[in-house]
Amino acid sequence: MTSWVARRWPTLLAIPLVLISLYDLNDVRDLAFLLVLCPLAYLMPASFNRPGITWPAVLVGAFAVGPLRFLDLNPAYALLVASLVFVVIGTVRRAPGFGIQVVGAVLFAVLAVIAIEAGSRAVGGVLVAIGLLAHAGWDAYHHRVDRVVPRSYAEWCFVVDVILGVVAIVLIF
């Protein structure tokens, strides 16, 4: 049992985060920032070709989200600016394998913005759910190939994305 817990710590860490994310959630579109934050956690280490900076980047991003939400600002837009910074850094550094991370970050960011700006809560929520579940596939792939980010992050993010994606669908319907 102890070895299982030691190996599955990312999953066990993800579950409380999911519960915190769902606390007082009135609109599924409020989770759209994750469609920018999670890919940013791939983009940043890819821009430097250093997977080891993933977890510190996630912590910084997570702590940045709190004050933005407190000020009633959508963190997705601030995270988009951060993403642009790392696109420039990765482009200048010509980091290997960086291009696919940019493509993924852009696609998820576009989906996030469309979901946030959607006139309908249901349509926006469905787009967030689709984005989260699609990002879970991204996580599963990166966990399997063990590149760009540590496997622990890919597992953690997969659990967060799947649970929140499924819960988003349930809350919409």
Image: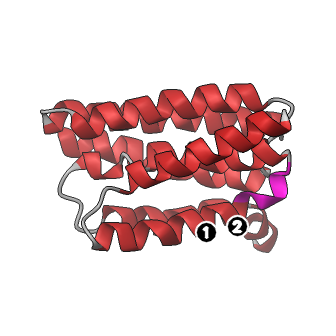
Q: Which residue is situated farthest in the left direction here? A: 120
What is the secondary structure assignment of the residue under circle 2?
Answer: helix
Q: Amino acid at mark 1?
A: Leu
> At 27% across and 71% down in the image, what residue appears?
71
Q: Residues within 10 Å of mark 2 (few under 14, many from 20)?
A: few
Residue 156 quadrant = bottom right
Q: Is residue 10 left or right of residue 129?
A: right
Q: Quick check: 155 left or right of 63?
A: right
| Residue 162 position in % (x across, y down) | 48, 43
Give the residue displayed 42% in from the left and 30% down from the top.
Answer: 110
How many numbered tags mark residues here? 2
Please say whether residue 97 is visible from this viewpoint: yes
Judge whether 60 appears above or below 108 on screen.
below
Is 40 situated left or right of 110 in this image?
right
Which stretch appears magenta?
50-54
Q: Kindly indicate whether the residue at mark 1 contacts the one at mark 2 (C-beta within 8 angstroms).
A: yes
Query: From the viewer's perspective, is 128 left or right of 79?
Result: left
The location of residue 56, given as percent across then percent down, is 70, 67
Residue depicted at 38% across the width and 74% down the height: 67
Type of secondary structure dominating the magenta stretch: helix
Secondary structure of residue under mark 1: helix
Q: Please name the residue that numbered disc 2 is placed on.
A: 56
Residue 124 % position (x, y): 24, 35
Tag shown at residue 92: none
Q: Label 2 is placed on what type of residue?
A: Pro
- Residue underneath mark 1: 59
Q: Residues within 10 Å of mark 1 (few under 14, many from 20)?
A: few
Question: Image quarter for residue 11?
Answer: bottom right
Magenta residue check for 145: no
